[in-house]
Image (cartoon, coloured by chain):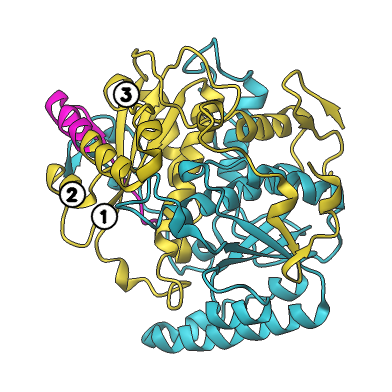
Chain colours: A yellow, B cyan
Amino acid sequence: MTHSPLGLAVPTDPADPLHAFGSEERSGVYRAIHERRDMRHFSGGVVADEVLLRLLRAAHHAPSVGLMQPWRFIRVRSCELRTNIHALVEQERVMTARALKEREDEFMKLKVQGVLDAAELLVVALPPGREAHVFGRRTLPEMDLASAACAIQNLWLAARAEGLGMGWVSIFDPEQLTQLLAMPEGSKPIAVLCLGPVAEFYAQPMLQQEHWASRAPLGEMLFEDSWGEPMGIAGSCA
Amino acid sequence: MTHSPLGLAVPTDPADPLHAFGSEERSGVYRAIHERRDMRHFSGGVVADEVLLRLLRAAHHAPSVGLMQPWRFIRVRSCELRTNIHALVEQERVMTARALKEREDEFMKLKVQGVLDAAELLVVALPPGREAHVFGRRTLPEMDLASAACAIQNLWLAARAEGLGMGWVSIFDPEQLTQLLAMPEGSKPIAVLCLGPVAEFYAQPMLQQEHWASRAPLGEMLFEDSWGEPMGIAGSCA
């Protein structure tokens, strides 16, 4: 293992030399994963159509349960619509702050300015008619959302590789957003994505920089055979 | 744009030259996204601890709503436990087939052998106590699952870059799996991940190769300002 200037472990020996990517391509995947940030600060600008298209194609190549592809992307071009979506987010921001009680003031300091400032605004929604898809969902119907989240993560990582920032805003009333976008019954918005050029990427997750929360030690996430039993390899990971 | 041997569009001009990755690293991100497959066929072997650890670290660097990090990974080492999980999956496979009615026989031909054959079996679960996290979840409580799905997608893409296959199995009864793993009340398993060496990666999604479903044209996924209104750039995408 060698280390990049950012302190990331860059793998030198792939797990399967036959099927593995070359070291530069492999490094790109780990860089995107480790340097992706949930961005709140954008610097305007534009995203060229061909770039947006390859990001959306990346999203569309996500895994989906039973190949149901339960994702739809609504590009917000209308300024009025963007203003209305921003108002929805602001309204829910106040409601969330109240629900957080003692952390209300702290929460209110975290702005969601990206909804107005980002070059592109995309709403991601689950389509209607999902109940027809039973494959992999009979006992876990929420796998449609899981698939759509994978699509968003693809978009996010591709955007990072392109040098673009993205933020996933889930602070809105889904019913009201459904109305703003004339969405059909049975569909559901799950994300307002702010996408575009940024002045710089946060060195740490923004919520960690702002002391809202910290990344947990990896070892605490890892069990073996039974809940709470430490994973054999977990001792070596900070 | 140039094209790789697999017909993938490889971007030559990044969106933001200042923050973008170099072309090889960028290409790695797109390759992982486009060549990742939901694998059902594994060739045994092993995953070295250090490789597993960097895959789990990649998962742990996923975005999460309010930085709640709602993911736990249980590595299944016990052969008896693996056998029991396979039995759970087989049981639900029969139940799902029945629920599919006219596609029952077709569905039963799709085996889930990976649960027995993959080098590693990992169960991913949401931890208890998630109701304490209100940030970004007051109106969309299911964002915890969305975050955990992003973690799984990170793991999947990193595994592809390492040359390892992965499959996400959601065909199981979550209550019974909870008992097998002695999981606490309030936690929930969302995935049985099969991970390890494979003889080859499918050229197309396995469910497409098996004629279960096909990838939809990207244009059908893209709207502008209002549901059903075609996205301005969508005309150029097949």
Among the 4 quarters of the image, the one containing residue A44: top left
* Residue sitting at x 39%, y 49%: B134
Q: Earlier in the sequence, mark 3 or mark 1?
A: 3
Q: Earlier in the sequence, mark 3 or mark 2?
A: 3
- Judging from the image, what secondary structure is the residue with disc 2 in? helix
> Looking at the image, which is closer to me, B216 or B33?
B33
Q: Earlier in the sequence, mark 1 or mark 2?
A: 2
Q: Are marks 1 and 2 in contact (CB under 8 Å)?
A: yes
Amino acid type, callout 2: Thr
Q: Which mark is residue A178?
A: 2
> Looking at the image, which is closer to me, B20 or B60?
B60
Counting from the top left corner in percent of width and height, residue A64 is at 47, 58
Amino acid type, callout 3: Gln
Q: Chain of mark 3?
A: A
Q: Which residue is mark 1?
A: A188
Tell me where the magenta segment starts and ends, as one range.
A68-88
Q: Is residue B61 left or right of residue A169?
A: right
Residue B173 at least partly seen? no
Among the 4 quarters of the image, the one containing residue B38: bottom right
Q: Is residue A85 magenta?
A: yes
* Residue sitting at x 55%, y 74%: B185
Disc 1 crowd, CA 10 A, few/some/many (<14, 14-19, 20+): many
Q: Are marks 3 and 2 in contact (CB under 8 Å)?
A: no
Q: Which residue is mark 3?
A: A113
Q: Is residue A125 left or right of residue A25?
A: left
Counting from the top left corner in percent of width and height, residue A213 is at 55, 38
Amino acid type, callout 1: Lys
Q: Chain of mark 1?
A: A
